[in-house]
Image (cartoon, rainbow, N blue to C red):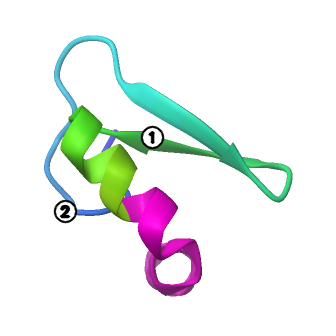
Amino acid sequence: MKCTVCGDEIRGKPYSYNYKGNTYYFCSPMCMVEFKKRPEKYVKLYTSNKP
């Protein structure tokens, strides 16, 4: 599983955040905070990178 913000592989238990009915996962609390600041930016990146 990869971090929604930085794209790094998540090792161990991921941090997660529910936004508009979807759960997003992060490798660190800093990435989760960054997502919360500008979620639409990362939602667009996340959906464009999904297979």
Q: Which residues are magenta?
A: 35-50
Q: Residue at x 54, y 71 (%)?
A: 39
Helix, strand or loop at label 1? It is strand
Q: Is residue 18 above or below residue 38?
A: above
Residue at 32% in and 12% down: 13
Q: Earlier in the sequence, mark 2 or mark 1?
A: 2
Residue 23 included in the magenta stretch of the image: no
Residue 16 drawn at (x, y percent): 50, 32
Q: Amino acid at mark 1?
A: Tyr
Please provide percent x and percent y for residue 6: 19, 62
Which label is found at residue 6?
A: 2
Mark 2: give few (<14), some (14-19) or many (20+) Cα within 10 Å: some
Label 1 Cα crowd, 10 Å radius (few <14 / some 14-19 / many 20+): many
- Residue 3 appears anywhere in the view: no
Q: Looking at the image, which residue is at 45% across and 40% down?
A: 25
34 horizontally vs 12: left or right: right
If the image is split into quadrants, where does the N terminus sit?
top left
Asked whether residue 46 is drawn in magenta, I would say: yes
Q: Position of residue 38 (x, y in %)?
A: 47, 76
Label drawn at residue 41: none
> Looking at the picture, does residue 48 appear above or below residue 8?
below
Residue 28 falls left or right of residue 36: left
Note whether residue 35 is visible. yes
Q: Which amino acid lies under the numbered mark 2 shown in the image of this protein? A: Cys
Residue under label 1, please give it.
Answer: 25
Q: Quadrant of residue 14?
A: top left
Badge 2 element: loop
Question: In the displayed structure, would residue 33 be above or below residue 25?
Answer: below
Q: Answer left or right for 15 relative to 48.
A: left
- For the residues labelled 2 and 1, say whether their Cβ atoms are less than 8 Å apart: no
Total label count? 2
